[in-house]
Image: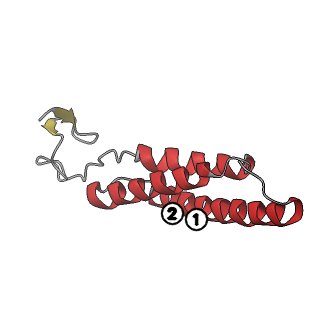
Amino acid sequence: MALIKCPECKKDVSDQASSCVFCGRPLKRKNRMSGFALFGFAISVTSVVLFLIGFLGIIGFTLSLIGLVICKKKGRSGTGLAIAGMIIGFISTAFFAVWSYYLNSLFGNITW
């Protein structure tokens, strides 16, 4: 437990307190973003750009799902990024599957 200065009365209060015990001013806590949500979103967006690498969408979807669970359990920010990463990752994977099926039907049996 650390002490922080109240922005209003400048007295030391606990960093766990939701408001200053001296003046009653609400204290804002820094809400950390989930790294999994951010990284999952970034991988999902990359999978759209590099759609030839189909497993990136699956990895982005999975990391975003983990990030969403962390955001819900620990109260962190990044829920929107996690949901967007899941949607983009799913669409990218589906696009890759359809694209692979289409190429396979055009050119015969293609091995990746």
Q: Is residue 18 left or right of residue 70?
A: left
Task: Find residue 81 and report its horizontal and vertical position in percent.
Answer: 52, 56
Query: What residue sits 43% from the left and 59% below the top?
Result: 65
The tally of labels here is 2
Q: Quadrant of the N terminus?
A: top left
Query: What residue sits 26% from the left and 49% below the top?
Result: 27
Mark 1, residues whose alpha carbon is within 10 Å: few (<14), some, or many (≥20)? Answer: some
Mark 1 sits on what residue? Answer: 87
Q: In front: mark 2 or mark 1?
A: 1
Q: Is residue 1 depicted above or below 48 in this figure?
A: above
Residue closest to the far right: 106
Q: Residues at badges 2 and 1 in contact (C-beta under 8 Å)?
A: yes
Q: Is residue 40 left or right of residue 52?
A: left
Task: Find residue 100 and report its horizontal and vertical position in percent.
Answer: 75, 60
Which residue is more in the foreground, 60 or 21? 60
Task: Give the image quarter of residue 90.
Answer: bottom right
Query: What residue sits 25% from the left and 53% below the top?
Result: 26
Task: Find residue 91 and report its horizontal and vertical position in percent.
Answer: 65, 65
Return the mark for residue 103: none
Cα distance in 3D space between marks 2 and 1: 6 Å
Return the mark for residue 83: 2
Which residue is more in the foreground, 109 or 26? 109
Mark 2, residues whose alpha carbon is within 10 Å: few (<14), some, or many (≥20)? Answer: some
Q: Amino acid at mark 2?
A: Ile
Q: What is the image's colouring?
A: secondary structure
Q: Secondary structure at mark 2?
A: helix
Q: Amino acid at mark 1?
A: Ile
Query: What residue sits 73% from the left and 46% below the top?
Result: 50
Q: Is residue 21 left or right of residue 38?
A: left
Q: Is residue 64 depicted above or below 97 in this figure?
A: above
Q: Secondary structure at mark 1?
A: helix
